[in-house]
């Protein structure tokens, strides 16, 4: 990890998972000025996989050029000892997984309005990333997040919704293909075509937004088997329960949007994130 002799000084560990550890750190600027940042250290075991490292660096370079209010800004990429690290914007708040768990402990749910708002903000960030082009050539970057899931949705104390980990997602998917079982906890938010090993596009991220929206609205997990294999089989079947039977307060038009987002065939989903955002916006405006 970066230490006191380097540009970034670690202050505290914020979180850890199967791929990385996240720290709050302080960046030393000119004239003694300092800036709070987040440092994500990729676990050393993963960086021993050369294919993962190559993919990670390629994708992380793309992240450096993503600048949007709903995407966590990446400032720097470095290496210390055996591990790579990413320096990112520090978001003072929580991720969606932590929020949902906190609400569950108090027998509460996200609620219709906030759930739709969170999904809309996610769509703004995804739409921007999906449409990003190479600044030099003007060619499409064809960015797909591939890991839109509650831990990767950050919410600041000021009400901002930000997506994180564009630089790790594609590399992680490559690692899962070459070394099954190393990366855990990612399967519940895959799309059916990904479980079949097919090439995915932006509609994979849209499917993931649908899963998250379903779970926020119902307070239940959509695809969660006893094992990873069972979870994958559930996603392949893509059978969506009747939302209104779980939560009768969900408006019919919202249920229809969720079903379209979670269509098994990618061609039956919203073709892009902005279309999904617009559909959700209509619901909010219609209901005041």
Image (cartoon, grey):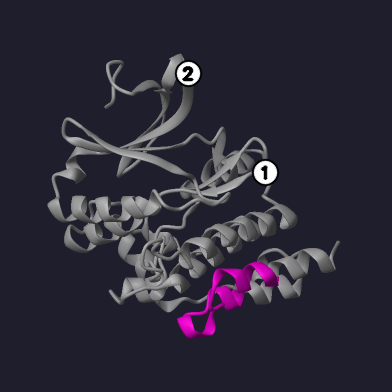
Q: CA distance from mark 2 to mark 1?
A: 44 Å
Q: Position of residue 135 (x, y in %)?
A: 41, 61
Q: Which residue is mark 2?
A: 33
59 relative to 262 in the view: left or right: left
Residue 281 is at least partly visible in this image? yes
Q: Quadrant of the N terminus?
A: top left
Q: Is residue 271 magenta?
A: yes
Principal secondary structure, stretch drawn in magenta: helix
Residue ID at (16%, 34%): 82
Q: Is residue 189 magenta?
A: no
Magenta highlight range? 259-279
Examine the image and state in which quarter residue 37 appears. top left
Q: Position of residue 270 (x, y in %)?
A: 56, 77
Q: Position of residue 206 (x, y in %)?
A: 51, 69
30 relative to 77 in the view: left or right: right
Q: Which residue is mark 1?
A: 107
Q: Is residue 112 above or below residue 266?
A: above
Dot 2 lies on which element? loop
Residue ID at (48%, 25%): 35
* Front position in the image: 152 or 225: 152
């Amino acid at each position: 990890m970066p230490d006191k002799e380097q540009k970034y000084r670690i202050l505290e560990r914020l979180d850890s998972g199967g791929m990385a550890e996240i720290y709050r750190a302080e960046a030393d600027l000119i004239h003694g000025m300092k800036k709070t940042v987040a440092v994500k250290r990729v676990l050393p075991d993963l960086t021993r996989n050369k294919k993962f490292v190559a993919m990670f660096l390629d994708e992380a370079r793309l992240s450096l050029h993503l600048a949007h209010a709903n995407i966590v800004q990446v400032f720097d990429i470095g290496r210390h000892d055996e591990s790579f690290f990413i320096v990112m914007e520090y978001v003072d708040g929580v991720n969606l997984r932590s929020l949902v768990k906190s609400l569950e402990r108090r027998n509460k749910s996200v609620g219709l309005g906030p759930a739709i708002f969170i999904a809309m903000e996610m769509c703004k960030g995804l739409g921007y990333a999906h449409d990003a082009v190479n600044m030099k050539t003007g060619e499409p970057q064809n960015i797909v997040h591939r890991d839109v899931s509650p831990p990767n949705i950050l919410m600041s104390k000021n009400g901002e919704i930000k997506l994180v980990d564009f630089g790790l997602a594609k590399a992680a998917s490559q690692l899962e293909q070459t070394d099954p079982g190393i990366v855990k906890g990612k399967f519940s938010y895959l799309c059916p075509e990904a479980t079949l090993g097919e090439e995915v596009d932006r509609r994979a991220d849209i499917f993931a937004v649908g899963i998250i929206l379903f779970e926020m609205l119902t307070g239940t997990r959509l695809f969660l088997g006893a094992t990873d294999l069972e979870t994958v089989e559930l996603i392949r079947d893509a059978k969506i329960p009747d939302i209104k039977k779980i939560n009768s307060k969900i408006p019919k038009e919202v249920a229809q949007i969720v079903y379209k987002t979670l269509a098994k065939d990618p061609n039956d989903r919203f073709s892009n994130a902005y279309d999904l955002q617009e559909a959700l916006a209509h619901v909010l405006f219609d209901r005041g």
